[in-house]
Image: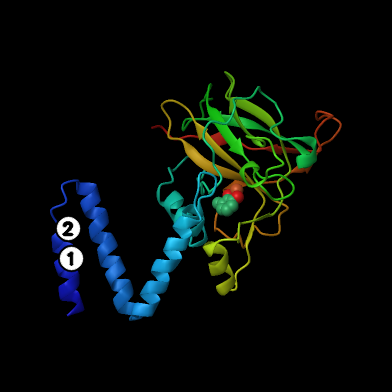
Amino acid sequence: MTTDLTEQVLAAYASTPDPRLRELLAALIAHLHAFAVETRLTPQEWLAGIEFLTATGQKCDAQRQEFILLSDVLGLSSLVAEVNAASDATEPTILGPFYLAGAPQRAMGEQIGRPQDGSPVLIRGRVTGAAGEPVAGATLDVWQASGNGLYDTQDPEQPPFNLRGVFVTGLDGRYEFRAVRPVSYPIPTDGPVGDLIWRAARHHWRAAHIHAIVAAPGYRPVTTHIFDAGNPYLDSDAVFGVRDSLVRPFRPAGPDDPPDVSFVTEMDFALAPA
Ligand code: MBD
Ligand code: FE
């Protein structure tokens, strides 16, 4: 009975001209139907699900992406990053809901934040290709939350593009920039995703992180993070984004380091060919 219905629906989409869309629709229908059959989904539960997704969409605006957050807390964003990871390249992880295109390009070494955003940290390293060759002219699009746990778009006190910037590697593939030491970050819980987190008796903390999208012509871009090795949420990140290979010590600056920074972190990035 139920399988007949599933077959009927699958057949109705079987002539979708675009082959990839045809494949995605067939798998989506099969899994959605299996979900309803397996759980004996009731009409009330189905409606609650519709209302939840409606509220998720209604929470979205130009600065708030509740659907990405939902995907994040369900582990789907992390899984998609994992499934698409290139071997011999820096491990990707989730984009998150707070990426903004169009961040200003900044000079080598520039600070992306303000003194009140947190302890200054120098972050530096190299971008290389699969054979270890330095990648000159690679862009690092970086963004992070302030010490109050808020991104610029969540906080009217921060100027636009605070704690965001694009850096370009030199001929030797090296980059460096200044940021602030990231803090543990509470994902926004004032929307339907927050309700879900509480009903699941989960916590809402992300391991402290700085985001980066590293890209260069002829290479596959990688969307990733730098995680602070000293953070207590590395093993229970609310959005399943932590990869061991992305965790770095933020070591206290010493006499050989620039006097204006409190911590130094080294992070190299490897890119796969396009
Ligand atoms: C974040 O800062 C973030 O990076 C992700 C993935 C989800 C919620 C908040
Ligand atoms: Fe983030």
**The C terminus lies in quadrant:** top left
* Location of residue 28 (image quadrant): bottom left
Q: Position of residue 83 (x, y in %)?
A: 40, 51
Task: Report the residue marked by disc 1.
Answer: 9
Q: Is residue 55 left or right of residue 202?
A: left
Would you say residue 200 is visible in this rendering? no
For residue 175, above or below residue 263:
above
Secondary element under disc 1, as helix, strand or loop, is helix
Q: Position of residue 18 (x, y in %)?
A: 19, 46
Q: Is residue 131 left or right of residue 194?
A: left
Task: Identify the coloring.
Answer: rainbow
Q: Is residue 10 left or right of residue 180?
A: left
Would you say residue 145 is visible in this rendering? yes
Q: Residue at x 43, y 35 (%)?
A: 220
Alpha carbons under labels 1 and 2: distance apart: 7 Å
Decide: marks 1, 2 in contact (CB < 8 A)? Answer: yes
For residue 272, above or below residue 150:
above
Could you tell me the amino acid type at mark 1?
Val
Q: Which mark is residue 13?
A: 2
Name the foreground residue: 171 vs 109.
109
For residue 159, above or below residue 20:
above
Q: Position of residue 66 (x, y in %)?
A: 50, 55
